[in-house]
């Protein structure tokens, strides 16, 4: 079998060949009417149907009717070649309208015709199409059997390019079935067969498929390499639109690998191509990616600029999926700036869009981000529900980055509540998945989370070690926001050890970085802790100024957790200044807030301080009740300790709690 029949769709795949002027359809119909024989008439009908397939969706039904008649005429005439072509094109018409049953039946009939006349070359192509129909319907076993037949026939044909195409289809099928290793093996064999002499288009497609597979399995370095090869191939073919798409994927891999400079270069090149092509959707997608890179390097001003432009375009072109992605990024900027209501509003939009689109990735990302906002606002139960939802969605979708972020969020809640064992498990999961992905932002968060966990348990030396590790990794990827937060952890650990000099140095550095990257919450937290340093040095007036400004900032931005800490430190300043009643008021407010948050580590310390003030004021019964509350909080923390964090250090951290409890006869 020669000519068009060698290709399952012949020139039906080329719209330009089918639409050569307004008179084309009339000429084709005239050919049908003037046919000298049934076989010639059937062939002319197939040509008309090919034209109709490209004349618009409203002509698809007409094309199908013409093909059904052509099949009948060719069959009656005994014209096997035309019957084969008619069935192949009829399968294409069925695929265009999503009619898998007709698509399958026509392809199966075409396969039987090929076998009957021993036409070996087109058989693997038909079998690949038939396998796709089975895979779409969820019958992976049938799809796999069909592809095995295709591979066997391609090998018999001795056509290495055809073998490579079948292996590519096998790779896609195995990836869809979840067998990443088998998929990778098929794609690598396909690439090996055609790397030197295969058609550029086929080689480029294989490179792209292999890159996508490696990306999904977390091998970002390997994916970057193959996306680069694909990019080169598209460039050689003159497909600038595909070059831009490959550059966008390369930038994503570079970003995940922490190579922000390379990511920016790839995106700048892609943006130039998109603008040259006047491709607004692609330009918006690239600007969204530029915004993400800017966020990851803590350049929130540029991030907001790029993301806002991307959002405007996404709204204008009605791309809801891109809107969800960009809104999530803008909400992250809002959270850093402590514009919490704005962040929450954007993220509620994201979840609405994601629900409408049934987009599990957007749902996971939006839920994780909103969980972070709710945690800062003190809505702990809601935050936990959102993080848990995100992890379930991410696990089901095999979306490891979503698992990393959800585990980080749940770990932070466990730290807030003083559940050391849960925090340890969550941050270990965060670290493990982030390490497998090579996602260094997640590794930073895991180390920082471990530092906060150790601090809760009183293991201040371990806390400082983990904070240093977090800072080192953050510095290596230019993640300045995390450098600042790691330094804050170092400062808090130093304060807990009584090393005020080191605490002040770390906290001042943290505040400087936070102010430089517009991290409003980070700057407020550093200032709040610096007030405690000033107080330790006897600089009461300075401590008062610092804590008053921090407290006002936390209150203005709705940061419930930060505000509770600031209220406690306001009490410390008032006590140092001899204003005992004012201190009593601040401590009561702080204890109430911490009780509401179930923030046991904070509650144990602050309730002890309140009990001591009540005791000094002669309020023995109140002091007894408050000390009992502090002891209960400390004991609940102690129940969750893990072997890595010894109890001896815990008792040093909460020494004041237990000493007061012993003195009041509350503990043995």
Image (cartoon, rainbow, N blue to C red):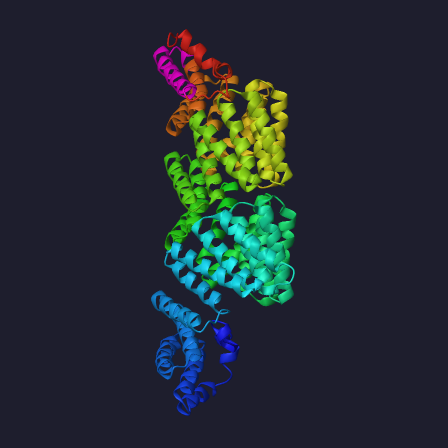
Residue in the foreground of this view, choosing between 633 and 469:
469
Residue 632 is inside the magenta segment = yes
Horizontal side of 592 relative to 200 (left or right) equals left
What residue is drawn where x is 48% and y is 36%?
A: 408
Residue in the foreground of this view, choosing between 104 and 558:
104
Q: Establish if 266 lies above or below 577.
A: below
Q: Establish if 92 lies above or below 522.
A: below
Percent of width and height locating residue 65: 35, 78
Percent of width and height locating residue 559: 46, 35
Total labels drawn? 0
Q: Would you say residue 345 is visible in this rendering? A: no
What residue is drawn where x is 65% and y is 50%?
A: 262
Q: Quadrant of residue 620?
A: top left
Percent of width and height locating residue 356: 37, 55
Q: Would you say residue 594 is visible in this rendering? A: yes
Residue in the foreground of this view, choosing between 396 and 658:
396
Residue in the foreground of this view, choosing between 570 and 96:
96
Q: Establish if 57 lies above or below 361.
A: below
Instruction: Quadrant for the C terminus, please.
Output: top left
Q: Which residues are magenta?
A: 614-639
Horizontal side of 628 relative to 206 (left or right) equals left
Horizontal side of 497 relative to 173 (left or right) equals right
State the predominant SS element of the stretch in magenta.
Answer: helix
Residue 421 is inside the magenta segment = no
């Amino acid at each position: 079998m020669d000519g068009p029949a060698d290709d399952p769709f012949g020139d039906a795949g080329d719209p330009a060949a089918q639409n050569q002027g307004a008179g084309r359809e009339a000429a084709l119909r005239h050919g049908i009417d003037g046919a000298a024989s049934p076989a010639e008439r059937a062939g002319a009908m197939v040509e008309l149907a090919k034209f109709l397939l490209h004349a618009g969706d409203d002509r698809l039904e007409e094309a199908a009717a013409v093909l059904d008649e052509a099949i009948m005429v060719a069959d009656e005439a005994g014209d096997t070649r035309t019957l084969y072509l008619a069935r192949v094109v009829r399968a294409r018409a069925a695929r265009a309208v999503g009619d898998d049953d007709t698509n399958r039946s026509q392809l199966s009939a075409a396969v039987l015709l090929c076998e009957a006349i021993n036409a070996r070359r087109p058989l693997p192509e038909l079998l690949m199409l038939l396998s796709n129909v089975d895979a779409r319907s969820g019958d992976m076993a049938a799809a796999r059997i069909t592809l095995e037949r295709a591979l066997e026939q391609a090998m018999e044909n001795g056509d290495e390019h055809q073998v490579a195409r079948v292996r590519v289809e096998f790779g896609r099928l195995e990836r869809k079935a979840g067998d990443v290793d088998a998929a990778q093996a098929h794609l690598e064999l396909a690439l090996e067969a055609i790397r030197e002499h295969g058609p550029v288009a086929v080689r480029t497609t294989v490179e792209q498929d292999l890159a996508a597979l490696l990306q999904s399995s977390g091998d970002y370095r390997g994916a970057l390499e193959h996306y680069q090869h694909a990019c080169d191939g598209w460039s050689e073919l003159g497909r600038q639109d595909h070059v831009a798409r490959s550059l966008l994927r390369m930038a994503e891999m570079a970003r995940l690998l922490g190579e922000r400079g390379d990511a920016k270069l790839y995106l700048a090149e892609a943006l130039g191509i998109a603008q040259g092509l006047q491709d607004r959707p692609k330009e918006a997608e690239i600007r969204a990616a530029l915004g993400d890179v800017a966020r990851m390097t803590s350049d929130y001003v540029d991030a907001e600029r790029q993301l806002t432009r991307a959002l405007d375009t996404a709204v204008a072109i009605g791309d809801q999926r891109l809107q969800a992605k960009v809104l999530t990024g803008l909400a992250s900027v809002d959270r850093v700036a402590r514009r919490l209501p704005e962040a929450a509003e954007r993220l509620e939009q994201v979840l609405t869009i994601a629900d409408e689109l049934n987009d599990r990735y957007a749902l996971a990302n939006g839920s994780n981000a909103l969980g972070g906002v709710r945690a800062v606002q003190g809505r702990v139960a809601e935050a936990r529900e959102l993080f848990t939802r995100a992890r379930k969605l991410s696990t089901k979708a095999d979306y490891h980055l979503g698992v990393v972020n959800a585990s980080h969020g749940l770990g932070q809640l466990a730290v807030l509540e003083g559940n050391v064992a849960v925090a340890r498990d969550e941050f270990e999961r965060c670290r493990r998945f982030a390490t497998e992905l090579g996602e260094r932002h997640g590794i930073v968060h895991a180390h920082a989370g471990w530092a906060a966990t150790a601090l809760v348990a009183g293991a201040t030396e371990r806390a400082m070690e983990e904070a240093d590790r977090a800072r080192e990794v953050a510095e290596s990827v230019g993640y300045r926001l995390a450098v600042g937060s790691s330094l804050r952890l170092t400062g808090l650990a130093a304060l807990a050890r009584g090393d005020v000099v080191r605490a002040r140095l770390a906290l001042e550095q943290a505040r400087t970085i936070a102010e430089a990257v517009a991290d409003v919450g980070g700057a407020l937290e550093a200032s709040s802790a610096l007030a405690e340093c000033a107080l330790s040095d006897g600089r009461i007036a300075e401590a008062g100024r610092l804590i008053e400004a921090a407290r006002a900032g936390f209150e203005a931005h709705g940061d419930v957790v930060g505000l509770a800490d600031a209220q406690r430190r306001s009490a410390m300043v008032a006590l140092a200044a001899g204003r005992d009643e004012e201190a009593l008021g601040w401590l009561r407010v702080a204890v109430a807030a911490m009780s509401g948050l179930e923030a046991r580590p904070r509650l144990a310390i602050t309730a002890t301080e309140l009990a001591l003030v009540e005791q000094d004021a002669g309020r023995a019964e109140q002091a007894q009740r408050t000390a009992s509350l502090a002891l209960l909080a400390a004991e609940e923390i102690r129940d969750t300790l893990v072997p890595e964090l010894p109890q001896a250090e815990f008792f040093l951290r909460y020494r004041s709690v237990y000493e007061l409890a012993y003195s009041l006869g509350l503990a043995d």
